[in-house]
Amino acid sequence: MVKKTKIPIPEPRTKFILIRCPNCGNEQVVFSHATFPVRCLICGNQLVRPTGGRAMLQAQFIKVVG
């Protein structure tokens, strides 16, 4: 009888993150690899700038959601 070896399942590198707007303090959930600029729902300030891979945050990082 041949013993099977366990193959690790890869985890995704993308996550949803909670950020805080530096202008108004609004907290918003965004995707870590956003492909479209994300603006604050309250004041309209740009919070996330897409870079082709991981998005560049222009707001305060709070925590990873989920």
Image: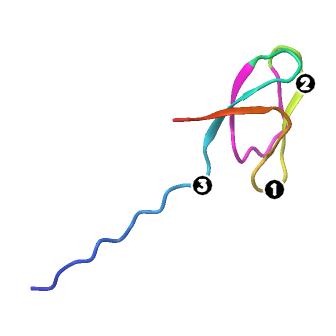
Q: Residue visible at 54% across and 55% down?
A: 12
Mark 2 closeness class: few <14, some 14–19, many ≥20 residues within 10 Å: some
Direction from residue 53 to residue 3 in the image, left or right = left
Mark 1 closeness class: few <14, some 14–19, many ≥20 residues within 10 Å: few
Residue type (three-letter) at the residue carrying disc 1:
Gly
Mark 2 or mark 1: which comes first in sequence? 2
Residue type (three-letter) at the residue carrying disc 3:
Arg
Between marks 1 and 3, how big is the CA–CA gap?
14 Å
| Residue 51 sits above or below residue 3 on the image | above
Instruction: Indicate the secondary structure of the residue bearing disc 3.
Output: loop
39 is within the stretch colored magenta: yes
| Residue 58 sits above or below residue 35 on the image | above
Residue 18: where, in percent of width, then height? 66, 30
Between marks 2 and 1, how big is the CA–CA gap?
21 Å
Q: Residue visible at 39% across and 67% down?
A: 8
Mark 1 or mark 3: which comes first in sequence? 3
| Residue 27 sits above or below residue 31 on the image | above
Residue type (three-letter) at the residue carrying disc 2:
Asn
Mark 3 closeness class: few <14, some 14–19, many ≥20 residues within 10 Å: few
Magenta highlight range: 27-40
Quarter of the rendering containing residue 57: top right
Tell me the quarter of the image containing the N terminus.
bottom left
Do the residues bearing badges 3 and 2 touch, measured as CB atoms within 8 Å? Answer: no
Tag nearer the camera, 1 or 3: 3
Q: Which residue is mark 1?
A: 52
* Residue that lies at the very extreme toward the bottom in this rendered image: 1
Q: Residue visible at 75% across and 52% down?
A: 54
Q: Residue 13 — which label?
A: 3
Q: Which residue is mark 2?
A: 45
Residue 48: where, in percent of width, then height? 82, 37
Between marks 3 and 2, how big is the CA–CA gap?
27 Å
Q: Residue visible at 63% across and 34% down?
A: 63
